[in-house]
Image (cartoon, rainbow, N blue to C red):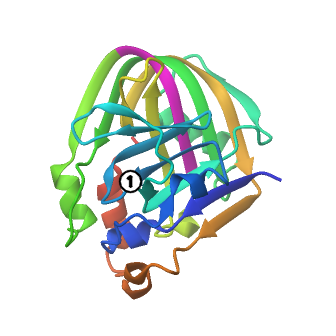
Amino acid sequence: MSTVYQHSTLAALMGKVLGGSATLAELKEHGDTGIGTFDGLDGEMIMANGEVYYMDGEGTIHHVTDMAKTVPFATVHHASDSSEKVKFSAGNMKEMVSLIDDRELENTFSGVILQGSFAYMKVRSAPKSERPYPSLSEITKTQREFEETNISGTLIGYYSPELYQGTVAAGWHVHFLSDDRTFGGHVLGFDADKLEGDLTIFDNYELHLPIDNKEFREHHVDMDGLKEGVAAAEGSQD
């Protein structure tokens, strides 16, 4: 059995529940690979081979060793889970979208760990927010975007079915980390000379809710415009 583990919901982030509610130590009990963000929607989190990295709002990558650091939202799995090899002679976000159609994965949760050489990589990262927290759409307006060319590294990401929109961001949610650990973040677009790695199709989706968190218990999900809000916050998959 392969399991993808998610802490909290995207709808909670949309509802301004941005305070950390799980530690990295707790998260690593469920996986050694994954993506997320930190307390106050502080930057982008990338977990690779059990090591945690953090891209701050200024675009700087940090190696995180404090496992007491907290996250409001994250998704992880074990890289050793059963997977299949995939390879592209060239790749971009459209190739990743076609991967779902080609393998009839529309109704599954899937994950990728893809290594490659990238002619172009565009990522974003948000600066840390302070209480009282702004909305996710407001934060999106202040996030910074970063570009790099001729860089090698790893894409780590997850595909979620449309059925679960709101609990997750339906479609692909992908982060990047360069091999030299100097560049990374939430992927907005890329062009790869070659991509290869592992595709995991999960037969178990485990959702952990922070029920001891007062803000999570009290937040209200505004279903009107949720899909559009998620799309604006997550970025294009074109």
The residue lying furthest to the left in this view is 142
Badge 1 crowding class, 10 Å Cα cut-off, few under 14, some 14 to 19, many 20 or more, is many
Vertical order, 169 against 120 (above or below): below
Give how far across and how far down residue 112 sits, in percent.
61, 38
Magenta-tinted stretch: 150-161
Q: Is residue 159 left or right of residue 221?
A: right
Q: Give the residue drawn at x 29%, y 43%.
A: 125
Secondary structure, mark 1, is strand
Q: Is residue 153 visible?
A: yes
* Residue situated in front as seen by the camera: 68 or 201: 68
Residue at 31% from the left image edge and 65% from the top image edge? 229
Apparent side of residue 172 relative to residue 196 in the rendered image (left or right): left
Q: Label 1, on which residue?
A: 38
Determine whether 222 is above or below 123 in the image.
below
Q: Is residue 137 left or right of residue 9?
A: left
Q: Main secondary structure of the magenta part?
A: strand
> Residue at image x 44%, y 33%?
176
In the image, residue 159 lies in the stretch drawn in magenta: yes
Where 12 sits versus 145, above or below?
below
Question: Can residue 169 be seen in the rendering of this structure?
Answer: no
Q: Residue 104: where, in percent of width, then height? A: 70, 48
Q: Nearer the viewer, residue 230 or 64?
A: 64
Q: Say which amino acid is labelled 1.
A: Phe
Q: Which residue corresponds to the image point at 24% horizontal and 53% vertical from the top-left?
A: 128
